Image (spheres, grey):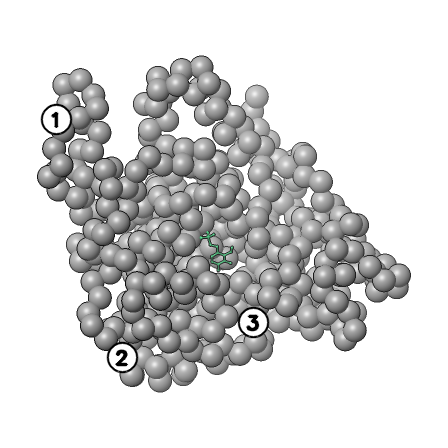
Amino acid sequence: MTLPVPHLGERELFPNLEARAYLAHAAISPASRAVQEAVAAVLDAYGRRGAGALLEWLPVRDRLRQRLARLIGANPEDLALVSNTTQGVLDIALCFPWNPGDRVLTFQGEFPANVTPWKQAGVEVSFLPLPRVRNPEILSLLEAELQRKVRLVAVSAVQFQTGLAMPLREIGAMCRRYGAALFVDAIQAAGVVPLDVQAAGIDFLTCGSHKWLMGMEGAGFLYVSPQWVERLRPRMAGWLSHEDPLGFLFPGGSSLDYERPIRKRADFLEPGTGNLLGHVALEASVGLIEELGVPAIHAHVTAYLDALEQGMERRGFASLRSARRSGILSVQPPAGWSLGDLHRGLARRGVVCSTPDGFLRFAPHWPNHRDEVPFVLATVDEILRQGS
Ligand SMILES: Cc1ncc(COP(=O)(O)O)c(C=O)c1O
């Protein structure tokens, strides 16, 4: 059966989505019919033929790398498919050619995925303050730190609590000026905020698939800029990281040899059997995003959030949204209201959002229609009138 063409603001591809307004894409996206059918097709093939289905699905990895590369302005050979955002951070934290005394700089309020691996790699990690105000001054603070020598700056493209889209181009230019590498956690941006690794001078970028890319949990990707791939130490290499890794499994192929060189390509960081279900899901969901185009999705989501923000502010909620728009509107409730009560009250009435770190976070995506906004605001009114 052919699937409906995706349209901004239409949820035909989400026929079983229960919420009247699903606004938790910054947490986990619902699976579209495209995703559900892609996964079902793999399960059907493996159910019938087991190992006989392997070769049919092997090209998914290449196709997916191509699609993801287009999304971030990269070349497909500079991408590795990894299991989640954290895995991409870990890969670089453990393979980076650190020197004694190297320092990683990140921001207060970063999601821990972009903190723990650097600490575990044994390098010094410093935090720049990132005040929770609408438009925090970032660049002058960053420059002052870079003058004190930093080997790598690790930052989220969009901050998970406030939705602040970081000025990546300016950060990238500044990192280049001071000789620091730039590492970006893109999971709150890719799929809703346009990204271009080359224009921003990004050295490494990691992203999981279950938020704005609308795939499933347990799949993601890592971009490694070509200037770094040769310099990484292959500490995370595995059996699939060698040149011709599958040859010894097939008749007429190469024989078993543990000394085959490790590939000098980003995909040496695909060390073992991959998450095929996650990959076909991601290929399907990114296909829809590509059809719609990220700039159009960004404009659509911005218009939705402009209307919602105005309405929430009129009701006494304080917005954390900055002029640097992302897919996130985070608000603080009026005095006397508990976040948990509001969140539960909204969910019971069909408005699903999330509550990271003390905020009520609304995150619509391309299938959300602007007509939902009056319903969300009426639901807020009802809760404020009646209690949760
Ligand atoms: C900025 C950010 N990074 C990373 C993650 C998650 O990382 P992972 O894909 O490794 O679970 C989240 C949310 O879950 C996030 O908001």
Residue 292 appears in the figure: no
Q: Closer to the camera: disc 3 or disc 2?
A: 2
Query: Which amino acid, mark 1?
Result: Ser
Q: Is residue 64 visible?
A: yes
- Cα distance in 3D space between marks 2 and 1: 48 Å
Kind of residue indicated by mark 2: Lys
**Mark 3 vs 2, N-terminal side:** 2
From mark 3 to mark 2, how far is it between C-alphas? 30 Å
351 with respect to 204 (left or right): right
In what element is the residue under mark 2? Answer: loop
Q: Please name the amino acid that badge 3 sits on.
A: Ala
Q: Horizontal placement of 209 versus 105: left or right?
A: right
Question: Residue at label 2?
Answer: 149
SS class, disc 1: loop
Q: Is residue 207 above or below residue 287?
A: below
Which residue is located at x 15 percent, y 23 percent? 253
**Mark number, residue 304:** none
Tell me which label, 1 or 3, sits earlier in the chain: 1
State the image quarter where residue 250 is shown: top left
Residue 298 coordinates in the image, percent (x, y): 55, 56
Residue positioned most to the right: 386
Q: Which residue is mark 3?
A: 323
- Residue 61 position, x and y percent, is 34, 36
Q: How many numbered circles does the render carry?
A: 3
Q: Which residue is mark 1?
A: 255
Q: 75 or 225, which is in the foreground?
A: 225
